[in-house]
């Protein structure tokens, strides 16, 4: 029970990390939908930047959380995977749409599983279900991407854009909810 309260305190104090994560996701999603005609090179840069930025924000959150709760390792793992995926995209710009699809699908499924785990850990906390919603969306889009590898770069951009906007909204809602959560020390007083 003490772990849940320290996690609530972490999210309360660092609600802005969730907000940043949501804003970055929404910006990526809007760009992917509004400019559907960019080249595969532009897609690679956008996707790599999104993976890396999301990973960096997750790693920052994990490092800030390391002394509060041992659950920080899940967030660190999620961030490291995002950074590695982002670097991989930049190192191999000649990837085809199918390879990008598989990379996105794997990242999306792993991220979704880790977010569902975090949401379950916080299940008794108001608004924590948004982590689970974000995780389910991540897994769903990842599975869809694996099932339909013949998708074109244009449809990939649209699908990723819709996912990124939905995920971003979930993170922003969670961030604002977490901002109002009372730390355990306040509850005890």
Image (spheres, rainbow, N blue to C red):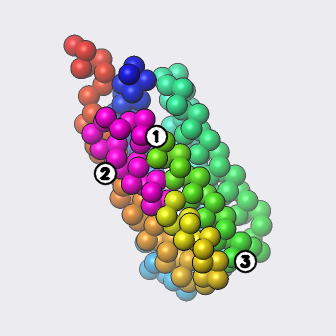
Residue drawn at 54 percent across, 82 percent down:
155
C-alpha gap between disc 1 and disc 3 = 33 Å
Q: Main secondary structure of the magenta part?
A: helix
Tell me: residue 70, above or below residue 97. Answer: above
In front: 163, or 114?
114
Residue drawn at 60 percent across, 78 percent down:
148
Q: Residues within 10 Å of mark 3 (few under 14, many from 20)?
A: few
Instruction: Compare marks 3 and 2 and give the one earlier in the sequence.
Output: 3
Residue drawn at 52 percent across, 59 percent down:
139
Camera-nearest label, 1 or 2 = 1
Q: Position of residue 135 (x, y in %)?
A: 46, 53
Disc on res. 158: none
In front: 169, or 42?
169
Mark 1, residue position: 118
The span picked out in magenta is 118-138
Camera-nearest label, 1 or 3 = 1
Mark 3, residue position: 96
Mark 2, residue position: 173
Determine whether, in the image, residue 57 is placed left or right of residue 14.
right
Determine whether, in the image, residue 15 is placed left or right of residue 189.
right
Image quadrant in which the N terminus is located: top left
Is residue 28 among the parts visible in the rendering?
no
Tell me: residue 148, above or below residue 118. Answer: below
C-alpha gap between disc 3 and disc 2 = 35 Å
Residue drawn at 64 percent across, 77 percent down:
149
Q: Position of residue 98 (x, y in %)?
A: 69, 76
Q: How many marks?
A: 3
**Do the residues under discs 1 and 3 have CB atoms within 8 angstroms?**
no
Residue 130 lies within the magenta run: yes
Q: Secondary structure at mark 2?
A: helix
In front: 100, or 33?
100
């Amino acid at each position: 029970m003490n772990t849940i309260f320290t996690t609530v305190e972490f999210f309360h104090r660092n609600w802005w990390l969730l907000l940043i994560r949501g804003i970055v996701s929404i910006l990526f999603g809007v760009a992917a939908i509004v400019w559907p005609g960019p080249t595969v090179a532009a897609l690679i840069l956008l996707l790599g930047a999104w993976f890396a930025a999301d990973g960096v924000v997750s790693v920052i959150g994990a490092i800030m959380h390391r002394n509060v709760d041992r659950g920080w390792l899940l967030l660190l793992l999620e961030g490291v995977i995002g950074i590695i995926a982002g670097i991989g995209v930049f190192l191999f710009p000649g990837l085809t749409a199918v390879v990008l699809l598989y990379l996105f699908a794997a990242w999306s499924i792993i991220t979704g599983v880790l977010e569902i785990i975090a949401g379950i850990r916080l299940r008794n906390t108001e608004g924590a279900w948004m982590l689970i919603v974000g995780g389910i969306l991540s897994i769903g889009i990842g599975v869809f991407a694996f099932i339909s590898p013949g998708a074109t770069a244009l449809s990939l951009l649209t699908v990723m854009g819709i996912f990124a906007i939905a995920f971003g909204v979930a993170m922003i809602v969670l961030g604002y909810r977490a901002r109002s959560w009372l730390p355990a020390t306040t509850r005890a007083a």
